[in-house]
Amino acid sequence: MGFTYNVGAELEFFYLKNASAPELLDHDGYFDQLSSYPASDLRRETVLNLAEMGIPVKYSHHEGAPSQHEIDLEYTDALTMADNLMTAKLVIKELAQLQNVYATFMPKPVSRINGSGLHLHQSLFAGEANRFYDADDEQYLSTLGKQFIAGLIAHAPEITLVTNQWVNSYKRLIPGYEAPVYVSWTHVNRSDLIRVPSYERGEEASIRIEYRSPDPACNPYLAFSATRPAGSLSLISHCLGRGMAWPTSLFSAAWPSRSPSSLLSPLAQHGLAPLH
């Protein structure tokens, strides 16, 4: 369709004292700025190294759970973002190992606290124009943007095969831990699968869709190969405004209640098909 599929990624992870047990490295909280723990120094060193490697970081901060950190990679096209994510994960792990620290991208390494996600901020551009922006819409979201949301909702079970591929992934997707548990969309509620961040005047390029279910243990190349076509295979009348039950296990995610869609068919060629 002549669009550039752009993605921004929020990469969450934990620093642990070793690889044998989930022993936390710090006990700080969300956006803690006073930490003197090695974890914050490690994150800062990682950001500086990524910048030297040509991988721009938009934000970096301590996340909500103890010893949980986040590095947000700057918006770029999907293929470059997949490359940047794979490189960033390697750099995070290698720099941590040099300090005898274990960095993990496991979705839920510790029970009773928040798990780690890979929130994907997505938009379609035609040249320099953000095609998700519409100045005349009450929510500043274009029909194309709403169609994209509809496609993601309609194909959520199939996408889940790729973006949440491990049994541990579903220990994260439970109520009460800032993880999506409803296949629906919203502006504020972080329990929904999709969030549309508020528009700020003069920031037309920032209108985007945040897809919240993926976790950092997924393969970003496959994840983007699922979310991009799913957004295009949309039928608004069938999807928007209607909630669906979120898969609660790997089995339920891999066995959609309807016949395989055109999205699932190409995935089957790579072994990603309903379980029998």
Image (tube, rainbow, N blue to C red):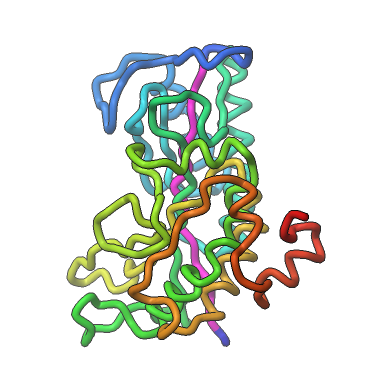
Q: Is residue 18 above or below residue 41?
A: above
- The C terminus lies in quadrant: bottom right
> In the visual, does 20 lie left or right of 107?
right
Quarter placement of the N terminus: bottom right
Q: How many marks?
A: 0
Q: Measured along the vertical axis of the image, is residue 179 above or below residue 100?
A: below
User: Magenta region's main secondary structure?
Assistant: strand
Residue at 41%, 85% in the rendered image: 237
Q: In the rendered view, tell whether residue 257 sits above or below residue 134.
A: above
Say if residue 130 shows up in the picture: no
Quadrant housing residue 36: top left
Q: Is residue 31 magenta?
A: no
Left or right? Give the position of 170 relative to 94.
left
Instruction: Give me the residue at 51% from left, 18% from top.
Output: 16
- Residue 274 in view, yes or no: yes
- Which of the 4 image quarters holds residue 95? top right
Question: Where does the image place residue 227, in percent across and percent down from the top left?
Answer: 56, 66
Give the residue displayed 77% in from the left and 64% down from the top.
Answer: 268
Residue toward you, 149 or 44: 149
Give the percent coordinates (x, y) of residue 62: 35, 31
Q: Which x, y percent locates residue 189?
A: 27, 54
Residue 187, x across and y down, in percent: 26, 62
Q: Which residues are magenta?
A: 3-16
* Residue at figure coordinates x 33%, y 82% from the top left: 142
Q: Is residue 212 left or right of residue 270?
A: left
Q: Quadrant of residue 155?
A: bottom right
6 vs 189, nearest the viewer: 189
